[in-house]
Image: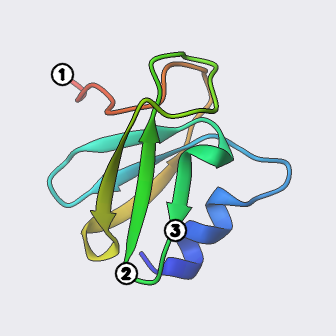
Amino acid sequence: MTQVDLHTAARRQPFKPFRVVLTTGTTYDIRHPDLIMVGRRSAIIGITNDPGGSAYDRTFQVDLIHVVGIEELASPSANGPAASPS
């Protein structure tokens, strides 16, 4: 995943929630554009305790080389690490 690809998803108008998938299998749901900041080599992902919130409670830094894909989300839920499918 390139910096341009992730930045494009984060700033799409109108914004569409999406999931960031990492090489480890960890996923982060991005439900608001203010909860991700994309840099040249990494992204800062904001995690909020409020499912509809746009202000983060904590953050994670993710190296872009570990981002293997993004998936569009359909249903609203809290922004943060998503449960692994069983």
- Quarter occupied by residue 6: bottom right
Between 2 and 60, which is closer to the camera in this rendering?
60
Question: Which label lies toward us, 1 or 2?
Answer: 2
The residue singled out by tag 1 in the image is 86
Could you tell me which secondary element the residue under label 3 belongs to? Answer: strand
Relative vertical location of residue 84 with respect to residue 63 in this rendering, above or below? above
Question: How many marks overall?
Answer: 3
Place of residue 86 in the rendered image (x, y in percent of width and height, measured from the top left): 18, 22
Place of residue 33 in the rendered image (x, y in percent of width and height, measured from the top left): 66, 48
In space, the residues marked 1 and 2 are separated at their CA atoms by: 31 Å
The amino acid on which the numbered mark 3 sits, given as a three-letter code, is Val
Q: Residue at x 71, y 44 (%)?
A: 16
In space, the residues marked 1 and 3 are separated at their CA atoms by: 30 Å
**Given contact means CB atoms under 8 Å apart, are the residues at marks 1 and 2 in contact?**
no
Q: Is residue 22 left or right of residue 80?
A: left
Mark 1 or 3, nearer chain start: 3
The residue singled out by tag 2 in the image is 41
Q: Is residue 33 left or right of residue 42?
A: right
Badge 2 density bin: few <14, some 14–19, many ≥20, Cα 10 Å: few
The amino acid on which the numbered mark 1 sits, given as a three-letter code, is Ser
The residue singled out by tag 3 in the image is 38
Could you tell me which secondary element the residue under label 2 belongs to? Answer: loop
Relative vertical location of residue 54 with respect to residue 39 in this rendering, above or below? above
Which residue is outermost to the left? 24
Between 68 and 55, which is closer to the camera in this rendering?
55
Badge 1 density bin: few <14, some 14–19, many ≥20, Cα 10 Å: few
